[in-house]
Image (spheres, rainbow, N blue to C red):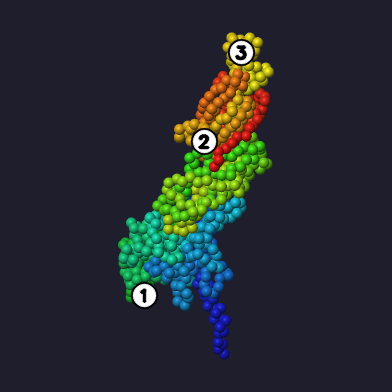
Amino acid sequence: MTRTPSIFGITLTFALWLLVLIRESSAFETSTHAILNEAAASSSSVFDLFLRGQLNLLKGPDEVLLGKAVVKWIGLGGVAEDQFDGSELLGGLTRSARHFHTPRLPWDRSGFDIPLLPRFESSVRWAQLPDQGITGRAAWKDARTAFFDAATGTSDSGRQQSYADVFRIVGQLMHLVADLAQPAHTRNDSHILGDDFEKFMASTPNQILITGFKTFDPNILLLPTGDAVANIPVARIWDTDRYDGSNPPDEASSATFGLAEFSSANFFSPGTISHTAYADPVLPLPGLNLLDLASIERYITGENRPYRGKSGYGVRVERMVAEGIFFRFLPPFVHNVVLDDVVFQNYAAHLLPRAIGYSAGLLDYFFRGRIEIAPPARFAYGLAPYQPGNAGTFTKLRFKVRNATPNEATGSGQMIAVAQYRRALTGANLLDDPNAEISSQLFFAVSQPLTAVVLTESFQEFIFDFAQSPIPANSADLFLTVVYKGRLGLEDDAVMVGGKDLFEPHPVDSINVSDWECVQGTPYHVGDLTAYPPYHPPTQSQRDVDHDQVQDLFGPGFIPRHFLKLFDLAQAAPLPSEANFDLRLVDQGPAQYGRVILLQDKSSFGAAVFAPDIVFIPTGLVQTNTFDTATLPGLHNDVVLGPGGELVRRVSAPAMYRGLAFQNAFLLATPGTFPCFPQTQPLPPDLTRIEGALPAE
């Protein structure tokens, strides 16, 4: 008896057929995609420099995030984009079915299209689709959101997760580009039963690594698309809309075309072998009638195979097809040709270098936004008062930024500054004990956002408010990042980043050491006015130490007020004043010091001090307009990459003087004192600190 199939049975059969079709519609094998992505990431010097210089990922693509290197996250993205989601509905919302783009069709009709099913979104649109539905979230917008979250994150673990998401999603977008190097995906060939080109690539992965890479003309990324969905010019990596059928990309012009155009115009896929060129307006080239006999070669099976090659109408391909046994005896509408491993090796020589180079181009384009950071007009990025235990904080940073992205202007956006640093594990004062152990974990201080910012090619100075997330003065390995989110070129909601490795917070001191003086190498404690009263010979002659009836000792001195100003050595030394100072001290007596904590970016810098009056206590005499300058070194307490690629600690050791650990200091002393300055180092009393004033922001 014949049984009529139920509606349920028909639906189930259709669903299973659709499942097979979709699972087989991926381009390269997932392992090949991982290799392609990793090769693309490793080939990009731009990406490497960006990671190291702008994001402070010191090992570049080899930096480990959540147990996996950056390059491996990108490789994982190549695998993840082909992962089938079992929760997909019968409607066909799968990822791999969106990996097609036929360049001779309008973009809203250029996706995977087979009878009885709705047309799928083209990969050029899929990459920029605002909502990819239940298949997951791995479009350009999702990568941008993760990048902004990573760059402005406030926890090390959260930041690492967000960066891992960025690199994985960008890897998934690179997968879409690499698929364009599989002709079936640019010629609407479903290859339901598999594709021998994929199998060939899966069996010879080393071929990828030895063919180098070829990229595109970056000017194509300045061209608007006019598409409602794929409106970011990265779509031009897919399709420039230049190929009209009569101008196939050749070696001389291929860089000005998208990869889909190059692939579709130059190569056959198993299901789209056309005998006559230009017979199909969507796939006008190549055509068997344009091929010439190239060679006869012994195939691995032992037979002799004639190969036909393409010498014009695009790139030269020595072996486009292998002739079948009956090729010369069958009518033109019967295609007795073979695409074998020899053919695929010829295809791969053209396509794989471009798969790598164009994928690297997408990677570089995603991270193209550059902000350059420069010191402010005042030189100091940040100034903080010293507090006991080095407990002070920086609540404001001031510096200049500019848009350093070539050929792309910004619109109005928001900008945030982020300071990345490490802490002393035991709470030790890193000024007194710079070798104290610091955290392997990173910490972050994030400023309040500045809004309606328009970056220009010229530097503009901004003040960033860290009051709600202050930067500890007692921190190490400090790195400054500024993040902008807004329009860049033709892309809305782009994310731009600039990084600057600052020298660690370090003190600059002004110390009054005039209570000890030296004559002929011997120190005298002139701060003890009982032992060294004012000079009134012959009854008070203690200050004539060599008994030649000439006074030798004059201190100590008292400074009613004086000013310290730090400056760039490339500029003229400033004259510190009430209107121009970084530290102002009032009523500084002997054995006292004032301190400011500084953030700056120079390996050496200048400091100037000006005291309108210095009063010599024993006599009341006044020395006026004392001015001096000095060159001071930047302070290191950070983690850097060693010669073998390992992370090493770098520390600038302080000097000790009378109970004070100091790095950079101005010393008020008589000229004769300096030759025996080391002798005074252990002498009492210890120096005591007085409060100083910092300039208002």
Disc number lying in front (2 or 3) = 2
Question: Mark number for residue 334?
Answer: 1
Q: Can residue 644 be seen in this view?
A: no
Closer to the camera, 275 or 432? 432
Q: How many marks?
A: 3
Question: Is 183 positioned to the left or the right of 155 in the image?
Answer: left
Q: In this view, does 313 lie above or below 679?
A: below
Residue drawn at x 36%, y 75% is 334
**Residue 521 as seen in the image, left or right of residue 327:** right
Q: Quadrant of residue 103?
A: bottom left
Report whether 307 appears left or right of 678.
left
Q: Residue at x 57, y 37 (%)?
A: 694
- Give the Cα separation between the discs numbered 2 and 1: 91 Å
For marks 3 and 1, the one nearer the N-term is 1
Count neighbours of disc 2 (C-alpha within 10 A) and say few if under 14, some if 14 to 19, many if 20 or more.
Answer: few
Badge 2 is on which residue?
579
- Measured as percent of width and height from the top left, residue 377 is found at 48, 40
* Mark 2, secondary structure of its residue: loop
Identified by mark 1, the residue type is Val
Return the residue nearer the eye: 573 or 622. 622
Q: Residue at x 45, y 58 (%)?
A: 491
The residue tagged 3 is 544
Residue 645 place in picture, x, y as percent: 54, 43
Nearer-N-terminus badge (2/1): 1
Q: In which quarter of the image is the C terminus?
A: top right
What is the C-alpha distance between the residues marked 3 and 1? 119 Å
Look at label 2 and name its amino acid: Ala
Residue 39 appears at what percent x and percent y?
48, 54
Look at label 3 and name its amino acid: Asp
